[in-house]
Amino acid sequence: MSPQTSSLTEVYWFAAYVDPGEAGLLELIPNPDHGAYFADDSVPSVQDPTAGLGAMGFHLAGFTPCPGGTGACCTPTGECFLLPLDVCDQLGGDYLGDGVTCEPSTCLSTSVGACCFEELCLLLTETGCGGEGGVWMNGAPECAPNPCSATPRVETTWGRVKSLFRR
């Protein structure tokens, strides 16, 4: 099974109707014995309690419990999640806007590497690094030794060091 990346995923379908001129509300409610949970596709599945359930209106307004909009959030690890802006910010992600979906190319670079902010080195995606005003270090895989240091470092052997200074 592949991960879902679209904003709408068919989970279960149903049919409902109201008589012409009538109004109705189809409201989701928790199971009286077990509550309401979202489960992932792992075995055994990880279940997260729902924060709220919505309703679909027929000739009247429905409602959604989600505060504000959601959109594509590119995390520092290069993954994309549909999240509200404040949650994306808490994760240190790059929020691409309300309604933007996580398509395969949404977060252009999925590999993390060294990103320099003067002498501070952070592991970010190339997209995240540029978005934050950093300098991408061409995919340097780590920040140790610090590639952003003003003093360049050269790795060598002790024998090579001795041969350079033995004269």
Image: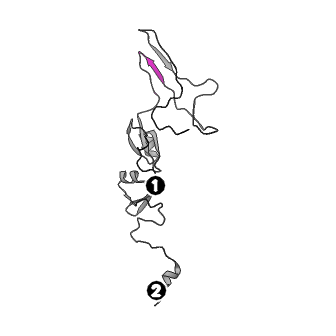
Q: Which residue is mark 1?
A: 112
Q: Position of residue 154 (x, y in %)?
A: 45, 73
Please determine whether, in this image, residue 46 is positioned above or below residue 161. Answer: above
**Which of the numbered marks, if any, corresponds to residue 165?**
2
Q: Position of residue 70 (x, y in %)?
A: 42, 36
Please determine whether, in this image, residue 11 is positioned above or below residue 44. Answer: above
Q: Quadrant of the C terminus?
A: bottom left
Residue sitting at x 49%, y 64%: 144
Q: Which residues are magenta?
A: 53-64
Q: Position of residue 139 (x, y in %)?
A: 43, 59
Magenta span: predominant SS is loop
Residue sitting at x 36%, y 51%: 131
**Of all residues shown, which one is farthest toward the bottom?**
167
Q: Position of residue 96 (x, y in %)?
A: 38, 42
Residue sitting at x 44%, y 54%: 124
Q: Amino acid at mark 1?
A: Val
